[in-house]
Each structure stands twice: as structure tokens, then as C-alpha cells.
Image (tube, rainbow, N blue to C red):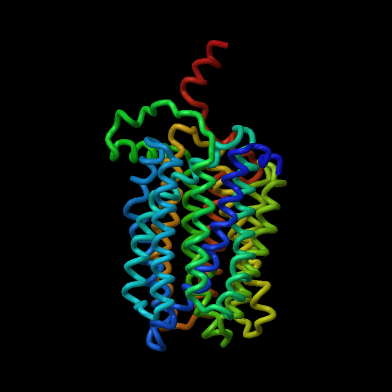
Amino acid sequence: MAVLRHRNFRLYWVGQLISLTGMWMQAVAGSWIVQDLAGDTFPTLALAVNNFAVQIPALLLMLYGGVMADRFDRRRIMVITQAVLMVLALVVGTLVAVDAITFWLLLCTSVFVGIATAFDMPAQNALVPDLVEPSEIPQAIAMNQVIFNGSRLLGPAVAGVMIAVLGLASAYIANGLSYIAVIASLLLLRLPKRPPRPAMQQSAAQAAKEGIVHVWRSPLLRSLMGLSGATTLFIFPCLAVLSPAFVREALHQGPGTNAAMFAASGAASLAGAFGLLWVPGNRRGIVMLGSIVTSSVALFVLATTEMVLIAIPFFGLLSLGMGLVFGLNMTTVQQVTPGAIRGRVMSVSGLMFNGVVPVSGLVLGALSELTGLRAIYGLCGVGYLLLAGWLLWRSGLIGHAPETLMPVPVERQAVMAGD
């Protein structure tokens, strides 16, 4: 936790903790609102459709968002996007409070959330390493995972109480107000003026292509991007998109159990986030392999159990495995990527998430209406174990530190030859 000695990182960390807590409060309320609006006709598919509405704009604009993160002030981009997300949360909360919300209005606001996310995610991922020393990037990423997953524990717990007392709209209003904290923290940062980037001389298309080519030429980065996509394809929909329907249809429970599942997920992921701080570089591959197996086993158990007391802890293990894979993946990508191109590389990473989620959530949601959610969870467990295991083996990360797998830059080769 020594990275918290940096004023900039400390401000950012506290602001994000407050804002992310509000986001997870809204997530609990939002999933139930979508199912209520859809009725008994297609509740599971409705969750997938709403998720598609959020993710598809991000898919289309993410690479351009990465270019903007490398060209312009990342803090300013985040202030704008966070303000937009604040307004959207307050608008939806107001509509829910006056009973004027409809499924189609909710979808429209979800599209705007996706547009804002396409610019916010690359800027945010690229900004974090700028707040600490280069050698502290792994610790900064781990501490970022701590607040992300800690808020998953705190947010649903608070939401469960607020929704019971004040109704579903209160979670949206609370989330809208929480953005004030993160906007204030961003405005208080003291950042040195960034030098002009070479990408300023390129078109947006050329700059985006440079980021894609950089990833493609590195077997390590290419495999890690694929692993991120596999995790998003098989694990994320079961954890975040379809889980409310799983609680309702497979476990026959209500919003309270749904909040407990989210809280268990947050608690397990919080433990995993702290664990990231103690994983040495040459052990990342083996820890990621163990996490892949853990997630697959958790899906098998969820596919077969009907007991809430069993489902909740294994839902937590599913989240633990996913969090470790994503956290170690992102730490490695950030560590081996030059700062000048980091925004574009992180946009490619974001694309592997936002490009896969809308399709996987929609397809799995539709298939679940035909086969049932239990069959979907079991098939995802098998698919993830095979595909993610193969991609991790291809990366070469098992038994090796990530920096030893990256090619030596041409200019460094010349220096070494001169030596």
C-alpha cells in the first residue's frame, strides 16, 4: 500500500472507491428493473439486450477512445465522461422514482453509457500508471483492483438496505451523486504537462492501427488479449449479465439473494486483489492457470446445485478466479507497454472486453431460454477451461517473468551491439 503515499494516486483512489460503490449499487437495482420491465416473457434475454446496448457503442468507438487517450489530456477526458455518466444515472433514477421508466427508455440511456465508457476506459487505464513511479505500476494496478472489488462488496450490501427502505430509484440517485467524488479528485490532481505525442502527426486511423500492430507483433500481448476475450466470453456473462436470472430461475430467490451473490463476489475478488500484491512476475502464469481451473470448477458446481448456501460461496470463487485472471493480465500488459502507446494498447484490451460481452451476453441469454441456465453454466465451464488454458500456455507466461518474453527494442539492440 506504499503507493498511497503519492498524493495524486491517493486522491484518485479515494474518488474511485466512492464512485465504484455507487456503480455497484446501481447494478443491483438495474438488473431487477430490467427484469421487472420485461415481465415473464423474456427476462433473461432482456438482461442480455440491455447489456448489448451498453457494450456495442463501446465496441464501435473503443479504438478511437484509445487514440484520444494518447493524444489529449486523459484527466480532462475522464472529467467529461464521468459528468455524462452522472447525468445519466440521475435521469434514470428520476424516471424510476416517478414511475415513468420504460424498457426502451432504459435501453436508450444504456447506449449513451456505452458511448461514454468507450472514451473513459482507455483514458482511465492509461492514467493510473502516470500517478506512480514506473516500478510501482504493478502495485498501483493491484490497489485499483482492491477498490474495484471492494466496492463490489460494499455497494450491493448498501444497495440491499437502501432498496428495501427507499426503493430501486435510490440506488440510481446515490450512484449519480457518487460521481461528484471522482470528478473532484480528478480536478485536484497535480499532473506535469505532457509532451506532444508522435501520434499527433498521424490520422486517427493510423494511430489506432499502430496500437493493433504493436499488440499483434508480440506473442505475449496477443495471447493475453485472447485470454481476456475468453474470460469475457465464458465467465463475465455468467457472473454479471445472467446471474440475476440465475437467482430468480435456478435458485428461485429474490433481490436479497441477488445482493448477497454480488457481495460474495466482491468479497472474494477483494481477497484476490490483495493477493495480486504478492504474486511475483515469474509466478503470474501458474497463478493464472489456477484461477482458470477455479472458475471452471465454480461454474460446474453452479450448474448442478439448487442450494443457496452452496451457490453463494461458489459464485464468490467464480469471481475470485475471474478477478485474478483480469488483474494479472492487466498488470502484465501495463508493465510491458510503453507510455506513449499505452492508451491505444489499453483500448485494444478494452475492445476484447466490450467487443465480446455484447455478443456473448446476447447469445448466451437467447440460448438459455431454450436450454436453461444450468446447461449454459456447465458448457461455459468446459469451454473456458479448454480455450483459456490453451491461450495461457501459448503466451509463454507459465514459469517466466513477462519482461523476458518481450522482444528487445531495435534501438536497445543497437546500444547493446555498441557495448
Vertical position of residue 81 compared to residue 36: above or below:
above
Vertical position of residue 298 compared to residue 247: above or below:
above
Front one among 344 and 116: 116
Front one among 206 and 179: 179
Left or right: 273 as drawn, with respect to 207: right
Vertical position of residue 360 compared to residue 14: above or below:
below
Residue 316 visible in the picture: yes
Left or right: 167 as drawn, with respect to 348: right
**Which percent across, then down, holds residue 143?**
64, 48
Which residue corresponds to the image point at 34% horizontal and 78% vertical from the top-left? 102
Left or right: 201 as drawn, with respect to 85: left
Left or right: 321 as drawn, with respect to 85: right
Numbered marks: total:
0
Point out the image quarter for the C terminus: top right
Point out the image quarter for the N terminus: top right
Which residue corresponds to the image point at 51% horizontal and 20% vertical from the top-left? 413
Which residue corresponds to the image point at 39% horizontal and 60% vertical from the top-left? 113
**Which percent across, then down, holds residue 115?**
35, 56
Front one among 326 and 197: 197
Residue 334 visible in the picture: no
Which residue corresponds to the image point at 41% horizontal and 88% vertical from the top-left? 40
**Which percent across, then down, holds residue 130?**
54, 36
**Which percent across, then down, holds residue 332?**
57, 43
